Image: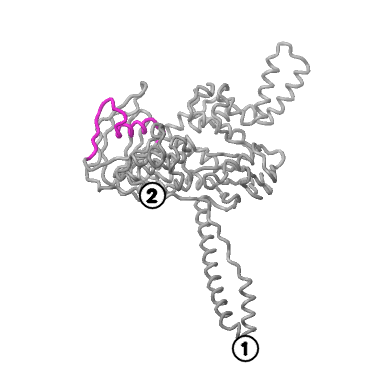
C-alpha cells in the first residue's frame, strides 16, 4: 500500500497540490487523470520520492518494493538489454554483480566463500535463477526479439528502448508500480500484451495515460486531479466521466430547488414582515432562509477545444485510385504493389506496427515523396489537408501564430483567423507567440486549426493524438466522427480508431496490405488477425533452456 497524507506542493506562490489525502491499495489499478498542467507526472514523482513535498508525507508499507517507468531513454546505453531489465529489481542485480566479482577473483579466500554462500542464499530466495528467463519473457511479450536481448541499449532504436524500460519497470513483481504514459511509442500488439499483464497484476498500479481505451480496460479506480485536489472514484475512466457529470447535474438541480425555495421565502417575508398577524411566520421563514446554503460548484480546470472540420465543397464519387504503388527505403521494401480505391464515405484507419509504411504512404499521397513505381490519382472534386507526424519544418520560422495561420487561409481577415485559434484555446496574447517556441501540444493545436481553416474534404492524419491531453483527444475524436468527408488516418488510440473508422488497412512488415471494410474491433477479432497473432506469438516465444 502507498498513501499520501496531507501532501502539499508549492511552486513559488502557486499551490500545485493542497492537503491531498489518498490511499492506493493492493490489487487495484488506479488511473491518474487531469488536464495538462494539473500535476499528474509531478504527483507520480512525489509518490516515487523523486520530488519533495512542501508539507505532508508519502507512506509505503514497510518492506514493499516500488518500481517506476523511467523516462530517460539514454540512461542505460552502455548496458546489455537483459541486464537493464533485471536492474528493475535493484537488490537482485546488486547480488548478481557481487557474486560475479567474487567468483572472478584469482585468490578466492575463505571469507569470499562465506560471502558467496550468503549471496547464493539470498539469490535463491529472490528466484534469481529465473531472472534471465523472466526478463526475456517480458521482452518477448513486448515484441523485443530474442536476438536483441544481448545487445547493448545504445544499439536499439527509440521504440525498442521504450519497451525495454517498460520491461524493467514490470520486472520482478514489484509491490507498487508507477507508470507514466506507458503506451507511448508502443505498437498495438505490445499495448494489448500490456493490458493483459496489468489486468492480471496482483499488486498496486498507478498509471497516467491519455489512452481512454487503455484506462477503461485496466483501471479499477480513477483518481481525478482538479484544482490541487484528488478525488477518488471506484471504476474506470468512462465510469468517472459519467459519475462526475451526474454529480454536477445533481448539484445544479439541488441548487435550482434551493433557489426556488429562497425566492418563495423572500417573497413571503417581503409581503408579511410588516403584518402583525403574520410576523411570527415571517420571522420563522427568515431563520429558514438563513439556513439554506447553495452548493459551491467550482468549474473544472479542464478545457475542451472546439474541433469542427467543415468542407468548402461536397466531394464527388471519384475520390482516390491507387495502382501498383511500391516504395523501397534504405534497401527495405516499405510498400509493395499496393492497389486500392477510396469511396466518398470512407474513413480509413491505417493500423499495425509498420509505422514507416503508414507515414510513407501518406507522404506519397500528399506529393511529398515519389513512389518507385505505380501511380495514384485524386478525384477532381477533392481537396486535401494533411497532419504530418513530424511537423518540424512547419514551425521552423519566426512567424507569430496569427500570421502563421493566416498564410493558410483564403480569408486574410485577422478576426476570422483568430476565431479558429480561439476554438483551439489560443486566447488573447497567445496569438502573438512565435510558433518556433510552442510546446508539442500547442503545435498540434495549431496544425488542427490549419486543417479546419483549409475547408478540405479529404483529411489525412498521421498520429494526431501525440502530445494532446485527454480533453483535446476527446474533442478531436468528436470532430473526426462528425466530419462529412473522406479520411485516412493512423493512430494508436484504440477508441479513436474504433469510433471513427469504417475501413481498416494494415500494411504488413513485407509491404503488402490487408484491406477490410469493417470496424476496428471486428478486424482485431477476424481470422486474419487470429492467424497473425499465432505467428507473432510463436516468433516471440523464449527458447527452451
Q: Is residue 336 above or below residue 453?
A: above
In which quadrant of the rendered view does residue 488 lie? top left
Q: What residue appears at the point 57 percent right and 80 percent down from the top-left corner?
A: 270
Q: Taking 442 as reference, is 328 left or right?
A: left
Above or below, 106 against 481 in this view is above
**Residue at (66, 24) in percent of width and height:** 96
Asked whether residue 438 is drawn in magenta, I would say no
**Element assignment for label 2:** helix
Mark 1 = which residue? 277
Of the image marks 1 and 2, the number of the one nearer the N terminus: 1
Per the rendered image, the range of residues in magenta is 352-379
Observer-nearest of 432 and 530:
432
Residue that badge 2 annotates: 419
In which image quadrant can residue 374 be found? Answer: top left
User: Which residue occupies the foreground of this view, 405 or 91?
Assistant: 405
Lateral position of residue 299 relative to residue 131, left or right: left
| The N terminus sits in image quarter | top right
Q: Residue at x 54, y 47 (%)?
A: 33
Residue farthest bottom in this picture? 277
Give the answer, above or below, for where 530 lies relative to 103. below
Residue 26 placed where, x, y %? Answer: 64, 45
Residue placed most toward the observer, 157 or 394: 394
Q: Is residue 368 magenta?
A: yes
How far is the residue under mark 1 from the one under mark 2?
61 Å
Q: Is residue 497 above or below residue 338?
A: below
Query: Which element carries disc 1, helix, strand or loop?
Result: helix
Q: Position of residue 241 (x, y in %)?
A: 50, 54
Residue 491, by quadrant, is top left
Amino acid at each position: 500500500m502507498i498513501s499520501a497524507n496531507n501532501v502539499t506542493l508549492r511552486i513559488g506562490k502557486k499551490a500545485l497540490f493542497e492537503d491531498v489525502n489518498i490511499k492506493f491499495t493492493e490489487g487495484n489499478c488506479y488511473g491518474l487523470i487531469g488536464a495538462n498542467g494539473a500535476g499528474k507526472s509531478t504527483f507520480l514523482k512525489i509518490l516515487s520520492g523523486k520530488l519533495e513535498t512542501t508539507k505532508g508525507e508519502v507512506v509505503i508499507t514497510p518492506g514493499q518494493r516500488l518500481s517506476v517507468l523511467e523516462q530517460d531513454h539514454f540512461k542505460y546505453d552502455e548496458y546489455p538489454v537483459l541486464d537493464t531489465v533485471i536492474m528493475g529489481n535493484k537488490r537482485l542485480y546488486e547480488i548478481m554483480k557481487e557474486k560475479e566479482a567474487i567468483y572472478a577473483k584469482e585468490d578466492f579466500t575463505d571469507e569470499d566463500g562465506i560471502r558467496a554462500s550468503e549471496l547464493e542464499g539470498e539469490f535463491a530466495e529472490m528466484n534469481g535463477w529465473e531472472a534471465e528467463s523472466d526478463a526475456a519473457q517480458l521482452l518477448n511479450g513486448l515484441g523485443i526479439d530474442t536476438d536483441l536481448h544481448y545487445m547493448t541499449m545504445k544499439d536499439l532504436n527509440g521504440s525498442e528502448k521504450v519497451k525495454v524500460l517498460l520491461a524493467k519497470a514490470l520486472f520482478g513483481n514489484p509491490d507498487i508500480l508507477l507508470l507514466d504514459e506507458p503506451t507511448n511509442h508502443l505498437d498495438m500488439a505490445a499495448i494489448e500484451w500490456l493490458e493483459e499483464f496489468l489486468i492480471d497484476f496482483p499488486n498496486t498500479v498507478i498509471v497516467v495515460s491519455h489512452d481512454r481505451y487503455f484506462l477503461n480496460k485496466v483501471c479499477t479506480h480513477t483518481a481525478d486531479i482538479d484544482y490541487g485536489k484528488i478525488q477518488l472514484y471506484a471504476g474506470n475512466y468512462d465510469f468517472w466521466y459519467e459519475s462526475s457529470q451526474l454529480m454536477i447535474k445533481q448539484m445544479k438541480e439541488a441548487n435550482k430547488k434551493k433557489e426556488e425555495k429562497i425566492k418563495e421565502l423572500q417573497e413571503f417575508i417581503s409581503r408579511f414582515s410588516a403584518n402583525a398577524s403574520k410576523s411570527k411566520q415571517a420571522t420563522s421563514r427568515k431563520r429558514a432562509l438563513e439556513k439554506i446554503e447553495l452548493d459551491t460548484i467550482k468549474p473544472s480546470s479542464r478545457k475542451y477545444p472546439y474541433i469542427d472540420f467543415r468542407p468548402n465543397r461536397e466531394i464527388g464519387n471519384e475520390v482516390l485510385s491507387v495502382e501498383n504503388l511500391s516504395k523501397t527505403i534504405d534497401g527495405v521494401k516499405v510498400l509493395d504493389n499496393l492497389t486500392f480505391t477510396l469511396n466518398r464515405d470512407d474513413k480509413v484507419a491505417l493500423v499495425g506496427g509498420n509505422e514507416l509504411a503508414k507515414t510513407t504512404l501518406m507522404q506519397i499521397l500528399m506529393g511529398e515523396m515519389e513512389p518507385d513505381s505505380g501511380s495514384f490519382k485524386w478525384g477532381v472534386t477533392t481537396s486535401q489537408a494533411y497532419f504530418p507526424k513530424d511537423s518540424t519544418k512547419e514551425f521552423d520560422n519566426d512567424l507569430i501564430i496569427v500570421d502563421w495561420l493566416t498564410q493558410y487561409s483564403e480569408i486574410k481577415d485577422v478576426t476570422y483567423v483568430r476565431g479558429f485559434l480561439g476554438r483551439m484555446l489560443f486566447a488573447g496574447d497567445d496569438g502573438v507567440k512565435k510558433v518556433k517556441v510552442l510546446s508539442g501540444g500547442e503545435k498540434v493545436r495549431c496544425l488542427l486549426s490549419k486543417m479546419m481553416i483549409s475547408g478540405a474534404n479529404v483529411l489525412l492524419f498521421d498520429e494526431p493524438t501525440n502530445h494532446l491531453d485527454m480533453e483535446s483527444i476527446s474533442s478531436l475524436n468528436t470532430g473526426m466522427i462528425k466530419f462529412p468527408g473522406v479520411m485516412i488516418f493512423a493512430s494508436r488510440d484504440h477508441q479513436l480508431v474504433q469510433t471513427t473508422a469504417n475501413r481498416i488497412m494494415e500494411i504488413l512488415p513485407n509491404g503488402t496490405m490487408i484491406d477490410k471494410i469493417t470496424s476496428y474491433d471486428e478486424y482485431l477479432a477476424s481470422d486474419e488477425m487470429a492467424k497473425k497473432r499465432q505467428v507473432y506469438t510463436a516468433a516471440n516465444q523464449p527458447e527452451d533452456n
